[in-house]
């Protein structure tokens, strides 16, 4: 803090909680349970090269991707931190094909947690930034019993909280409950997340674009036109833009959130008969969309607001354009124009 006071995450949650007099602290306690898992994951990630936790498992997940040991570790730590607190009625994870039930011996609560336990798997054993992404909903089914798919398959605008933890040069937790976006940096010497970025605002416009240029042959025309537009020379709009692509959504998103710019993962038309978006709506696109909008940015499929989409399955994929308002809206212009011309 500017005046040197240390604001811990706990203090921040309590101060936020005071805005809701009827709150019984249920949300704060649940959120703090989650941060314990994030601290443990951070500890393992930061020493991953020293312990036998790198590399691949023999398993593949529902996505057909090889499960990395650290994916499995992170998934397991979050489950164990969250299964017994009595706050959740169910969970959903990128690493689990089906809805995750709360063990019968524990009370079922009023919230739902959905998460990508470790985002950026291809970078895990390369010492490149990776992260965890999560979102929290209120259950929509009757209280007391097991949660159902109906509780998990909710549109982004129903999220009560969303966040990510980026394991990079430092470990940083960024979250929103709809009251702005706040960043906390982990001080490992005391094991506390300390407020370091209060009320993050995404610049209205940036000079960076993030996209996997290696897939450019397989993009839709609108994406091709937009990226070519960013590469043109135009002093007034700061073009040509710089290209930055880490390959971890959390890291690319976080940099653009702070510096301004746009991240794009469009539908891949490698197989024209089976166009395929890559990123998952429930636990990647929607949580980051909540954060982007709360920070003054935007998140879209190119046509639709991400926060308006209701997933039909846990692992449903969507095209994602997210970051500074100017670039997302400009992308939407190019996307719609190319689509109209193709019809
Ligand atoms: P995950 O590791 O959770 O499967 O997510 C990986 C995602 C995302 O982090 C990143 O933006 C994207 O995959 C990179 O995909 P490409 O390697 O195809 O560019
Ligand atoms: Mn991911
Ligand atoms: Mn993942």
Image (spheres, rainbow, N blue to C red):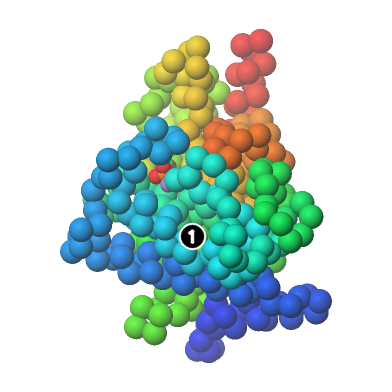
Front residue of this view, candidates 257 and 276 = 276
Question: Residue 37, position in %: x, y?
Answer: 45, 67
Residue shown at the point (38%, 64%) measured from the top left: 41
In the rendered view, would you say 17 is above or below 226? below
Front residue of this view, candidates 300 and 113 = 113
Question: Residue 135, position in %: x, y?
Answer: 60, 55
In the rendered view, would you say 36 is above or below 118? below
Tell whether circle 1 marks a residue whose Cβ is less than 8 angstroms from ligand 3. Answer: no
Residue shown at the point (48%, 45%) measured from the top left: 96
Residue shown at the point (47%, 76%) measured from the top left: 193
| Left or right placement of residue 66 versus residue 336 in this view | left
Question: Residue 173, position in %: x, y?
Answer: 49, 66
State the residue lying farthest toward the front: 105
Query: What is the quadrant of the C terminus in the image?
Result: top right
- For residue 171, what is the image quadrant? bottom left
In the rendered view, would you say 95 is above or below 277? below
State the residue lying farthest toward the right: 22
Tell me the element at label 1: helix
Question: Residue 317, position in %: x, y?
Answer: 54, 34
Taking the image as drawn, is residue 179 in sight? yes
In the rendered view, would you say 109 is above or below 70? below
Count numbered badges in the picture.
1
Residue that carries the numbered disc 1 in the rendered image: 79
- For residue 16, what is the image quadrant? bottom right
Taking the image as drawn, is residue 294 in sight? no
- For residue 66, what is the image quadrant? top left
């Amino acid at each position: 803090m500017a005046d040197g006071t240390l604001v811990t995450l706990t203090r921040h949650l309590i101060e936020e909680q005071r805005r809701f007099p009827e709150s019984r602290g249920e949300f704060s306690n649940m959120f703090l349970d989650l941060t314990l898992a994030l601290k443990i994951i951070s500890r393992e990630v930061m020493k991953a090269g020293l312990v036998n936790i790198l590399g691949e498992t023999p398993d593949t997940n529902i996505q057909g991707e090889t499960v990395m040991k650290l994916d499995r570790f992170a998934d397991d730590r979050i489950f164990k931190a969250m299964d017994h607190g009595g706050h959740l009625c169910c969970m959903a994870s990128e690493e689990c094909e089906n809805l995750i039930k709360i063990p019968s011996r524990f009370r079922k609560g009023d919230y739902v947690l959905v998460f990508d336990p470790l985002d950026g798997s291809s970078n895990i054993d390369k010492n490149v930034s990776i992260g965890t992404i999560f979102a929290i909903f209120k259950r929509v089914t009757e209280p007391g019993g097991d949660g159902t798919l109906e509780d998990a398959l909710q549109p982004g605008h129903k999220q009560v909280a969303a966040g990510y933890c980026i394991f990079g040069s430092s470990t940083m937790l960024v979250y929103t409950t709809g009251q702005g976006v706040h960043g906390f940096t982990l001080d490992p010497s005391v094991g506390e997340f300390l407020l370091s970025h209060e009320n993050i605002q995404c610049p209205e416009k940036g000079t960076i674009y993030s996209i996997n240029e290696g897939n450019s042959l397989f993009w839709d025309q609108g994406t091709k036109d937009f990226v070519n537009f960013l590469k043109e020379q135009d002093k007034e709009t700061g073009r040509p833009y710089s290209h930055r692509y880490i390959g971890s959504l959390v890291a690319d998103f976080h940099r653009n959130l702070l510096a301004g710019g746009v991240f794009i993962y469009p539908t891949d038309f490698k197989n024209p008969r089976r166009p395929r978006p890559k990123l998952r709506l429930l636990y990647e696109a929607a949580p980051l969309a909540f954060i982007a909008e709360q920070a003054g940015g935007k998140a879209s499929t190119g046509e639709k607001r991400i926060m308006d989409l209701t997933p039909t399955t846990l692992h449903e994929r969507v095209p994602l354009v997210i970051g500074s308002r100017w670039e997302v809206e400009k992308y939407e212009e190019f996307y719609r124009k190319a689509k109209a011309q193709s019809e």
